[in-house]
Image: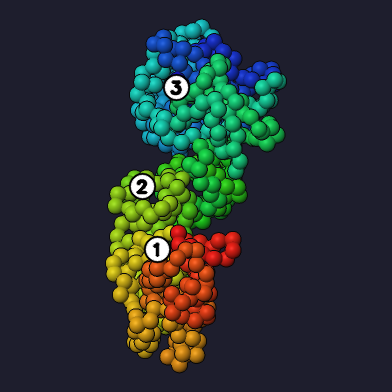
Amino acid sequence: MDVIATAGHVDHGKSTLVRALTGMEPDRWEEERRRGLTIDLGFAWTTLPSGRRLAVVDVPGHERFVGNMLAGVGSVPAALVVVAADDGWSAQTAEHVAVLDALGVRHALLAVTKADLADPAPVLADARERLAATSVGTVPGVAVSAPTGRGVPELAAALEALLAGLPSPDRDAPVRLWVDRAFPVKGAGTVVTGTLAAGRVAAGDRLALGGREVVVRGLHSLGRPVERAGATARVALNLRGTSVEELSRGDALLTPGAFRDTAELDVTLAREVDDRLPAEVVVHVGSAAVAARLRPLEGTSVRLRLAAPLPLRVGDRLLLRDPGARRVHGADVRDVDPPELRRRGAARRRAEELAARPDGAAGAAAELARRRFVRAADFAAMGWPQPDGATTVGPWLLAPGLADELAATLPGVVARYRQLRPLEPGPPVAVARRALELPDDELVPAAVRPPLALREGRVVAAAAGLPEPVQRAVDAVRARLAADPFAAPDAEELRAAGLGPRELAAAVRDGQLVKVADGVFLAPGVAEQARARLAGVPAPFTLSQARSAWGTSRRVAVPLMEWLDARGVTERLPDSSRRLR
């Protein structure tokens, strides 16, 4: 399916032309038909001679309804510009074409209507010349008399040629369906309509709507039920779990997680502006219209603060409308999560940065370099592709080269930490993360490289060791235990050796001592030695027998036996005797 929108001055015969082309009445309201004036968006469709299905969004031409017109053309890839032969290029023709130009529409067809009332040739020539100076460029033109049918077959043929030249929509893209109508249907519930410009939608899909999920109960396209629809298409979705009062024109149905709501963004105007920009504008995108404060940065770069957030992506084209002056400006979204501008000269530097940043993959690389790190899902939701060379760490993206930079910095962090706390093997991960100015502990492993290692939640040097006085004291204890593995020094002996709680904890972390219980420290390998001694004792054995086998005091034997129980070396029986497992 293809979708186009009409554009043109009031009373130039847009709706009459749509009726002649499709055989359908696009005006939906009784008042519109009574007054012969299109007020809101109208919709019709037809099958062209080639079999191509075409949907038409008919927009109002009166200046009072320009907001409705903008809601109709915002998601449509091509336009049918209508000018009357007996009136020529008029005020709303110029305003509608300025809208198409600001939106960057590049595909259009000119229809000169009422060709039975005046010679269409001069209007065709004039309108084509005017259109050539806009984004649509040189366009074909057809003279038509809708009431008599003259030129309608030629118009259909010209539409075939126009539609054949449209770029293929991205059907693998996430869905962002801007709602242009919402209404209840008896027995079905809430129905919304819109132009599906990219992606696919099917019955049963879950879509995000204003921070919550809704389910597509069913869908129609061109008046018929379908199981699924792919861009470009006019669709009507029956939604489960929402009422019509919760919806309005300008809402968007989104692939969950694929877009980022933003109320502050940086844009670049499509053209230099001669006059002073207004402080307040209305931002139009899709079918949405939101008031915004405008802050010029420098040149064509502008910062917008929206009165309500919108699901926008880098690369979106917006239309900025100054209602007081009836002027419109096209603007391309450059950043949906811009940095704060606090210091003097920050706005100018930001404008220079935006001007220097390329589009596409190169722009994504530049943006990731500026941010240094960002969650991959957030980066994609902003509209950026993942740049080559980026490092992935869990859910995070790191700029190319950043992991090497962090790895070069981390040894100094560890060394400084050990200078301040020599009894600790290295900083906890959270301390290292703060020192490296990272947003999440998950990123620290990207910076840990030999001789550093992660051990028990700390970043440690492989050969960190203990301070020399502590090491000498530990060596003395271990020499004693080498001669008598179960002769654990008591608290007084440990204090006399200079081993307080902090020093002992450091020796345990370093793997040089084993803490069996408070005040009871033995050498590594004590479990194997204890098992070997007990292997010569008939099972089951008592604590007293174990103590004798070990040749130690009750002060050591009781906690050692419990420690062995806990590690599965021994098993305590109901009568409190033990056996080896």
Above or below, 142 against 180 in this view is: above
Residue tagged by mark 2? 386
Residue 511 is at least partly visible in this image: no
- Label 2 sits on what residue type? Gln
Q: In what element is the residue under mark 2? A: loop
Counting labels gives 3
Q: Residue at x 68, y 31 (%)?
A: 244
Residue tagged by mark 1? 444
Q: Residue furthest top?
A: 148
Residue 525 is at least partly visible in this image: yes
Q: Residue at x 49, y 81 (%)?
A: 553
Q: Nearer the viewer, mark 2 or mark 3?
A: 2
Q: Nearer the viewer, residue 215 or 282?
A: 215
x and y percent of residue 484 in the render? 38, 81
- Label 3 sits on what residue type? Asp
x and y percent of residue 37 in the render? 63, 22
Residue tagged by mark 3? 2
x and y percent of residue 545 in the render? 49, 73
Q: In what element is the residue under mark 1? A: helix
